[in-house]
Amino acid sequence: MSDPFQHAVGLIRATGNELGSSFGYEFLYCPASLLSDRSRLWFLGINPGGSSKRKVEQNRDGNAYNVERCWSRDGEVLRLQVIELFGLLAAALNEEHSYGAALLERTLTSNFCPLTSETWKSFPKEQRRKAMGCSRALWEYLLERLSPRVILSMGRLPFLELQRVFARLGC
């Protein structure tokens, strides 16, 4: 079996190249080591917002919601909400000596579509269609090989897209 991380990055790079130089990507908001069967909890948004053309495969320094400080004003609000959500989850799970930031460090964190756009609505329609095709193939490939216990989706669209992927997988 090929390495899921390397396969995923290859697919994302190819789609990014096809879409053109105006698109960047941010795949994992956490270290690549969390893309494994050991990761029981996954957290997926829709796509990285902003105008960044960065090409980020993983965040080696820890979970981006904990360690990155270069968020836009709206992004910073979202970052703090995610940390608060994970604090509530850690408390609800009754994890001894755990808090939201620690739970985030053990969570595979990404976006259903790893390609960047200023906002989801501003993602050009034709490029969005291609990016979503790539994204569906990406998560189908990963979910055929990895088995998280829980996937949290940040919003309706990632939820519906994951539902579509699971239906294709016969789940």
Image (tube, rainbow, N blue to C red):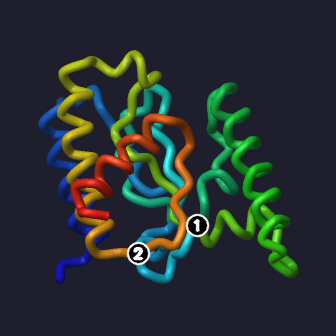
Would residue 129 be found to the left or right of residue 148 on screen?
A: left
Residue placed most toward the observer, 171 or 12: 171
Would residue 97 be found to the left or right of residue 162 on screen?
A: right
Q: Residue at the spot x=73%, y=33% of the render? A: 77
Q: Position of residue 144 (x, y in %)?
A: 26, 70
Q: Position of residue 57 (x, y in %)?
A: 37, 57
Q: Is residue 161 above or below residue 121?
A: below
Q: Amino acid at mark 2?
A: Ser
Numbered badge on residue 57: none
Q: Residue at the spot x=68%, y=36% of the render? A: 78
Q: Which residue in the structure is indicated by mark 1?
A: 107
Q: Position of residue 59 (x, y in %)?
A: 50, 60
Q: CA distance from mark 2 to mark 1?
A: 13 Å
Q: Position of residue 133 (x, y in %)?
A: 20, 41
Q: Residue at the spot x=26%, y=59% of the render? A: 140
Residue depth check, mark 2 versus mark 1: number of the one nearer the observer: 2
Quarter where residue 74 is shown? top right
Q: Crowdedness of circle 1 by 10 Å Cα count: few (<14), some, many (20+)?
A: many
The N terminus lies in which quarter of the figure? bottom left
> Tag 1 or tag 2, which sits nearer the N-term?
1
The C terminus lies in which quarter of the figure? bottom left
Q: Residue at the spot x=51%, y=75% of the render? A: 39
Numbered badge on residue 147: 2
